[in-house]
Image (cartoon, grey):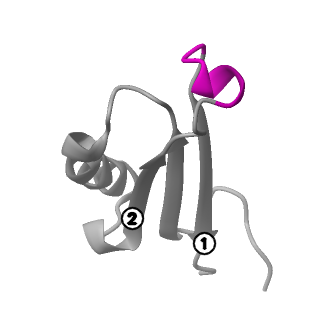
Amino acid sequence: AGHVAGKDPPHNVDATVLLERPKLRPHIDAMRTNIGAALSLERGRVSVKATTTETLGPVGQEEGVGAQAVCTIRPT
């Protein structure tokens, strides 16, 4: 059985936000809780990290924010 779009539930989420400011550390727990609730996932299955680009590129010059996320699914 293959993946059925929109039918197989998420299993884990791993997200990274790239930005110089503001610092997200005080908000990471709430972000994990909210993402988990939106996807019907236990908070322990959601990872959210924040990092900088060490002043490189548009993100480092505070002209934008970047994000990367991976969501694994659990076939039904």
Residue 56: quarter of image: top right
Give the residue drawn at x 40%, y 26%: 21
Q: Quadrant of the C terminus?
A: bottom right
Amino acid identity at mark 1? Ile
Q: Residue at x 41, y 63 (%)?
A: 47
What SS does tag 2 mark? strand
Residue that numbered label 2 is attached to: 46
Left or right of 43? Residue 57 is right
| Residue lying at 23% horizontally and 41% vertically, measured from the top left | 27
Q: Is residue 58 left or right of residue 8?
A: right
Query: Is any part of residue 64 visible from this angle?
Result: yes
Question: What is the quadrant of the N terminus in the image?
Answer: bottom right
Residue 54, by quadrant, is top right
Q: State whether residue 69 is above or below residue 3.
A: above
Q: Which residue is mark 1?
A: 73
Pinpoint residue 35: horizontal percent, then vertical percent.
36, 50
Specify the label residue 30 is tagged with: none
Answer with mark 1 or mark 2, whichever residue precedes in sequence. Answer: 2
Q: Farthest residue in the right direction?
A: 2
**Residue 62 x/y as whole percent:** 54, 17
* Closer-to-camera residue (60/8): 60
Mark 2, Cα crowd under 10 Å, few <14 / some 14-19 / many 20+, is many
